[in-house]
Amino acid sequence: MIVEERATSARVVAAGRIAAELGFGKSCIPEVGRLLGAAAASKPDGVVAESGTGSGVGTAWLHSGLGAGARLVTVERDAELARRAAGVFADDARVEVLHGDWRLLERHAPFDVFFCDGGGKRDDAERVVTLLAPGGLLIMDDFTPSSDWPPRFEGEVDALRLFYLTHPDLAATEVLTTPASSAVVATRR
């Protein structure tokens, strides 16, 4: 186990270095990363997906929980980020890094875990839900916590968050990841 933990940490660190080298400032925070690792571990033979690879930090966290029978597919619009992130996982055939639009993920669906961090969650929210397998987990981060109902952001009802929290095909909740950030976690019914 200790060797596996060190290897996992090495991938997170390697992806973080790439982010720093390329000036990419939108990497997954450790609090969300641990959530991603736990989600992937809950589906040991599952299909795990991510939209918005970035430099691969979130991908590395997902990889940390990836079972021997699972596979992970992630997509990134930026060619250089996708190329560099792919290098972090070049030694693991279970991981595929795609370059292009988030819709490239559709051919790999349905997903047992879907970290929707890039495209999709705003521009085609209904399609995101349909990409989940029954019992599949959907995770979206970068929300600002709201104590109001319906949830609000910058004084307005947060329609995007409300969509996922009230969708009839999802059992969803909002999880505080830091005092200033939250994630929506949902399971497809």
Image (cartoon, helix red, strand yellow):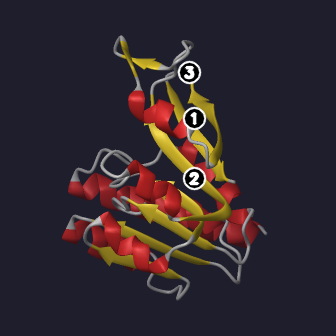
Examine the rendered structure and indicate whether residue 156 appears above or below residue 105.
above
Residue 41: quarter of image: bottom right
| Res 47 seen here | yes
Q: Crowding at label 1, few (<14), some or many (≥20) Cα neighbours within 10 Å?
A: few
Question: How far is disc 3 from disc 1 in space, using C-alphas?
Answer: 23 Å
Q: Secondary structure at mark 2?
A: strand
Residue 97 falls in which quadrant of the image?
bottom left
The residue beneath circle 2 is 138
How many callouts does the rendering have?
3
Q: Where is 124 relative to 91, above or below?
A: above
Amino acid type at image mark 2: Leu
Amino acid type of disc 1? Thr
Q: Which residue is mark 1?
A: 166
The residue at the point 43 percent across, 36 percent down is 142
Image quarter for residue 64? bottom right
Which residue lies at the image location 45% right of the left edge and 25% below the top edge? 144
Real-space CA distance between mark 2 and mark 3, rounded to the nearest whole angstrom: 22 Å
- Left or right: residue 58 versus residue 67 is left
User: Where, quadrant-wise, is the N terminus in this rendering?
Assistant: bottom right
Earlier in the chain: of badge 2 and badge 1, it is: 2
Disc 2 to disc 3: CB gap under 8 Å: no
Q: Is residue 31 visible?
A: no
- The residue at which mark 3 appears reads as 179
Nearer the N terminus, badge 3 or badge 1? 1
Mark number, residue 187? none
